[in-house]
Image (spheres, helix red, strand yellow):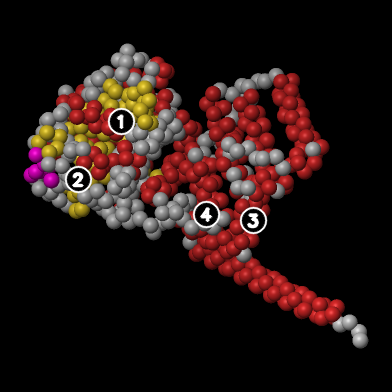
Amino acid sequence: MADKSGEDAVGPGLEQAGQDLMEGTQNLLEQMQQWGFVTLRAQQLLGEFAAEQLADGRLAEQSETMMRRWMEGADAPARYRLSAQDPMDVMRRQSEMITSSFEYWGKLMTSGLDGWNQPVETRDKRFRHEGWDNHPVFAAIAQAYQFTVERMLAWADDIDGLNPDMKAKLRFNLSNALDAVSPTNFAMTNPQVLERAYETRGESLLKGLEHMLSDLRKGQLTHTDPNAFELGENIATTPGKVVHETPLYQLIHYAPTTDKVLKTPLVVFPPWINRFYILDLNEKKSFVKWVVDQGVSLFMVSWKSADASMADVEWDDYVAAQIDAIDTIRDALGVEQVHTIGYCVAGTTLAATLALLAERDEADKVASATFFTAQVDFEEAGDLLLFTGDEHMQLVEQLSEPGYLDGRYMAATFNMLRGRDLIWNYVVTNYLLGEDYPAFDLLHWNGDTTNLPRKWHRSYLDDLYRENKLVKPGAIRIDGTPIDLGKIETPAYIQAGKEDHIAPLASVWKLMDHLSGEKRFVLAGSGHIAGVVNPPAAEKYQHWTNEDAGVETLDEFIAGASETKGSWWPDWIKWLRDQAPEEVPAKGGRKPGKGKLKAIEDAPGRYVKSR
């Protein structure tokens, strides 16, 4: 009898192979169907967006063109003019670059795949995904890009005949351009994006397209979940009342949490370039709540976002508003003096206010002045100086025709200063990876833009950034009165951020050179925001102080500084109490709405919600 055992074995094998083939075919058909759906949906989204563009009468296109011109940042490259150079020197530099390029590629080509698969430079977090190391093609792409960046920036630094300002502009624009063309920013050259697209069968790319079109509609990059926060509900929640209102600002009085408070109240002037609630994000981060809990009667100015009615508002009006707030609080609480804080541009304005009060013999209205990352001398104002050239100023004029500069343009400027982190990082995560937006209060605040009055913005750039008039005695007049910072004798606490890219440390230090009264300088870890908003409970960063009264320069301060772990807030509150230690019961007018100033509405008020 014939042996059929082989047939018996083959039968089930063929049957299993058939099932595998059927399942594979079904899976392939499902994938094709899914990718077909993704393609059709993407075409539908793009078609709807194009139809909206046409229906808007090219408004969106014009807005996009303006934003692109603004994002080009510093003066156009055509402005870079080289003085006469040695032609042989130029040829030598080009030869060195070409030679090093050949050496680089020769090394890769002669070392086989191992040469293409070297670990990517770990300092650049854009290439931290394992796909950049594990696949020779992507490793080569990353290495080639980083080599190009290194050589291009070295080339820019080596150019002779450019003055320092022009060289800084060239390097800034070149760095931004190189960041823009990073292979991480394109789907087909980013292994992480390709991996995510494969895993989600294209859904990640479709979701990213939806994110991108949404941002194009509103003309602003989204960093966080736009529906995650509501003012007064889960952000800006410290209890208080709006007790005074003008066309330019609202005054918030916060409810005391201690039985006694300092007799001398404190008023905070935040920058009108941003919303005040950066100082009141949530209970754990809130500077406002922390100060109130230290037994301080606290008032906060909430500026109105500019509209067409504010076209002629100028710096004098903001100085007058600060004086109005000071006088309103003095009268309401029956006190001679108030403490003041000025943050960023409001700190610059506070210096002008103090100088004007000194000229009027009214300096005693202010017991102390604290400056958060503020500048008065703009000689070393950093990369923001790159946005004050003639071409950029002309664009500012054009964009401010409605009577104000749309806050989205200023947001784009600040994002450009850290473009790799605040622009391209989110292009990858939001658009290419299609990730869900995080619920992050700081990023919510960062995207909550305010408009700037046309006349003020132009004069601010001209008088301070371009001509540096504030430090020239008599060069600036406020309400017809020439001012001189050297006449300010008000005790001052000056805080700077070690890594501040908006108000550089060296620039903030110059306050020490121009104020004449008692001064205390404190250097905080981190930058323009995290260096300020650093509650003690977080136990983050550090700060430096120097008790040597003879220190005259920033270098001397740093050389002799003592480092303290954690927040600088406790150092500041001790200094503030030392200025005026007397306390009074927290009753009557010390409670919002219970004294001369009646409550208008609950904090945070209407102005912070206006767009």
Which residue is the site of mark 1?
371
* Residue 46 spot, x, y in % from top left: 57, 63
- Badge 1 amino acid: Phe
Say which label, 1 or 3, has the lower sequence index: 3
Say which label, 2 or 1, has the lower sequence index: 2
**Callout 4: 10 Å neighbours few (<14), some, many (20+)?**
many
CB under 8 Å between discs 4 and 3: no
Which residue is the site of mark 4?
430
- Badge 2 amino acid: Tyr
Q: Is 212 situated left or right of 407 in this image?
A: right
Which residue is the site of mark 3?
194
Q: Is 267 situated left or right of 546 in this image?
A: left
Could you say whether the residue bearing mark 2 is in a helix, strand or loop?
strand
- Badge 4 amino acid: Asn
Say which label, 4 or 3, has the lower sequence index: 3
Alpha carbons under labels 1 and 3: distance apart: 48 Å
Alpha carbons under labels 2 and 3: distance apart: 51 Å
- Badge 3 amino acid: Leu
Foreground of the two, 512 or 216: 512
Specify start and end residues of the magenta stretch as a single range: 585-591
Alpha carbons under labels 1 and 4: distance apart: 36 Å
Residue at x 44%, y 32% (from the top left corner): 499
Foreground of the two, 111 or 469: 111
Residue 174 figure quarter: top right
Residue at x 37%, y 31% (from the top left corner): 565
**Callout 3: 10 Å neighbours few (<14), some, many (20+)?**
many
Which residue is the site of mark 2?
254
Q: Is residue 433 visible?
A: yes
Q: Look at discs 4 and 3 and give the one toward the viewer.
A: 3
